[in-house]
């Protein structure tokens, strides 16, 4: 059990570092001056889900789910 807990802890630490890096790579949500001129309705505004930014958002969501799952597993393993 100790070896499995160590492996899960190492995976958790790697996931924390990767999640931090992914969040820092994302752009801010503020539209800035582009909202005044209507730039939000451009090609990139409509197809943001297919762009690199959209992919980063999807990866972030899955990593957050993994983060919480591993946090719960590690918390339960602490008490057993």
Image: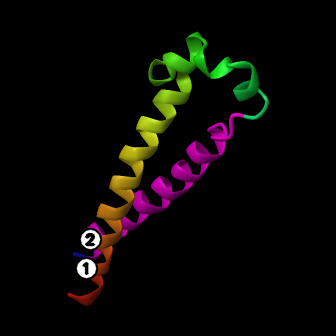
| The label number, if any, that marks residue 77 in the structure image | 1
Mark 2 touching mark 1, by CB under 8 A? yes
Q: What residue is shown at x 41% (from left), y 36% (from top)?
A: 58
Front-lying residue, 17 or 37: 37
Q: Secondary structure at mark 2?
A: helix
Task: Verify whether residue 3 appears in magenta.
Answer: yes
Q: How is the image coloured?
A: rainbow
How far apart marks 2 and 1 lie (CA) works out to 6 Å
Residue in front for this viewpoint, 70 or 58: 58
Say few, some or many: other residues with alpha carbon within 10 Å of mark 2 (under 14 / 14 to 19 / 20 or more): some
Residue 42 position in % (x across, y down): 61, 12
For the record, the magenta segment spans 2-31
For the point 70% across and 28% down, the residue is 35
Specify whether 72 is left or right of 51: left
Of the 4 image quadrants, the one containing the N terminus is bottom left
Q: Position of residue 26 (x, y in %)?
A: 62, 38
Q: Which mark is residue 73?
A: 2
């Amino acid at each position: 059990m100790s070896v499995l807990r160590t492996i899960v802890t190492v995976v958790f630490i790697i996931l924390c570092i990767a999640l931090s890096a992914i969040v820092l790579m994302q752009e801010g949500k503020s539209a800035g001056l582009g909202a005044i001129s209507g730039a939000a309705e451009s090609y990139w505004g409509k197809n943001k889900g297919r762009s690199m930014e959209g992919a980063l958002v999807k990866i972030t969501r899955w990593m957050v789910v993994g983060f919480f799952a591993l946090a719960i597993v590690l918390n339960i393993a602490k008490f057993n």
